Image (cartoon, rainbow, N blue to C red):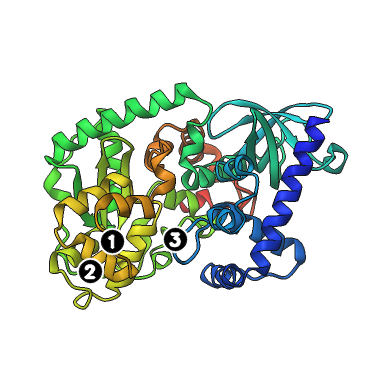
Amino acid sequence: MALVETLNSISSTMDKLIDFTVSDEFLSKDFENFLIRNNIQIERQNELNDCLIGYILDERTSDNTRILDYFMQKNPNADKNLIKSFKNSFISVFQVNKLLKNAYHCTCLANEMDFELIPLVKMTNLRSIGLYDFLKARMIEINNVFYLLEIFDCFGQFREYNANVETIKCLIKYPESQTMYNDKKLNELKNSTKLFYEKFTVLFGCDEIITTNTLADEFIEEFNDFIEGKCEIQAEKYKTYDGKYGYFVPRETGIDDTGKEDDFIKNAVGGFSNSKIPYDIGFFMDKDFGLFIVPFLGTFNEILRQNSLNNIKDAKECIEYFMTSGRVSINLIIKKGEEFENFLNIINEVFNKDFKDIREVIGYFRADFISKTRFSPTMALYNSKVFEKIIGMEENTVQKEDMKDIGRNDLCPCGSGKKYKNCCLLK
């Protein structure tokens, strides 16, 4: 009976969240702007519901308040523990190891842990999901019981490559999922972060370098080999930023993680040089949370250095991007507050606030990060077995000698589902 009550509580609370979002004047307008910003076209009711749920659970309002926190402000009597569980939910890919009567026994590819996941609908409604299939789904934990809050896609057992690609997408968006419920993985990331920090700071004599997008891919590859002891790096080679670039919409760079799936793997391991517009990229070595790749960090520094929003194109948008982006760690914000005396003045001017110190800034922009150990996506990928598999798959497809016997229009043997001419032939 307790299980039925919990399922009903989850469903009814989600219904309340959706009804509140569409009826609240401020939120309904904010949701419309969210659809416009992300170029989302709604054609069917189920698409609307899916977008609403994703917006409610993951997004923030225009004034940087999480939707769930806004809901609690307006509905103080709502179930606080359930809302907290919603806030800690994450999307990943799960492989089905066993079909149970009312649940799936699965392995989460992100954190390599096994879970018994109870779907919110009857198992008979999910007959198409078979043993060893892969589920892209949102997981939620309530009182040490795990549930499938949403199921987005199902990949057959022979579509492992596609499942791995989706896992990496989710891992970049939810890097904290890699260490949730897995202390061993947490220690792995701590050790990797310590190694990265020592190597980086000895090499560059600091914890931050600014380079250009044309060199960023090469740096990522070389630094990875440097960590593994496979090569040496000429540090001065990457200190090429001259302060001349400005800010523009991140999606134009091709680095946004909502980009096209076909380009995703290339962008995940680099791909910054694909942009037709030159721009600056910062590499910040956070001693606690790993290596962060921060587009427009040089431009951000230049705005603070000049103490003006008027000298650099789209300076206000650059500040907004920097402060609200998940790519920027707490420690980097603290560092900028210490490095530039005018930091608070600029932030207050852009956001029309009256922050008195850096603690207020962190509390406003990074409240969720304070209570979590949120390693950088770079560290998550470095410690991901799934990412290793993907790289290995790509390397192996390039090395196969029998590729020359495959027709240009045949399906590529790497398993991508694309024609050979549009896949490994290009390599």
Nearer mark to the viewer, of 3 and 1: 3
Amino acid of disc 3: Asn
| Proximity of marks 3 and 2: CB atoms separated by less than 8 Å | no
| Proximity of marks 3 and 1: CB atoms separated by less than 8 Å | no
Picture coordinates of residue 219 (x, y %)? 26, 46
* Label 1 Cα neighbours within 10 Å, binned few <14 / some 14-19 / many ≥20: many
Counting residues from the start of the chain, the first of labels 3 and 2 encountered is 3
Picture coordinates of residue 242 (x, y %)? 14, 63
* Label 2 Cα neighbours within 10 Å, binned few <14 / some 14-19 / many ≥20: some
Picture coordinates of residue 120 (x, y %)? 77, 42
| Proximity of marks 2 and 1: CB atoms separated by less than 8 Å | yes
Q: Residue furthest bottom?
A: 310
Q: Which residue lies furthest to the front in this view?
A: 77
Residue 415 visible in the displayed image:
no
Residue 178 visible in the displayed image:
yes
Counting residues from the start of the chain, the first of labels 2 and 1 encountered is 2
Q: Which residue lies furthest to the top in this view?
A: 184
Amino acid of disc 1: Phe
Q: Nearer the viewer, residue 3 or 160?
A: 3
Amino acid of disc 2: Tyr
Which residue position holds label 1? 296
Nearer mark to the viewer, of 3 and 2: 3
Alpha-carbon distance for marks 3 and 1? 20 Å
User: Relative to 156, is 216 above or below?
Assistant: below
Q: Nearer the viewer, residue 228 or 129?
A: 129
Which residue position holds label 3? 64
Residue at figure coordinates x 21%, y 53% from the top left: 336
Q: Is mark 3 on a helix, strand or loop?
A: loop
Checking the image for residue 245, the label placed there is 2
364 left or right, relative to 32: left
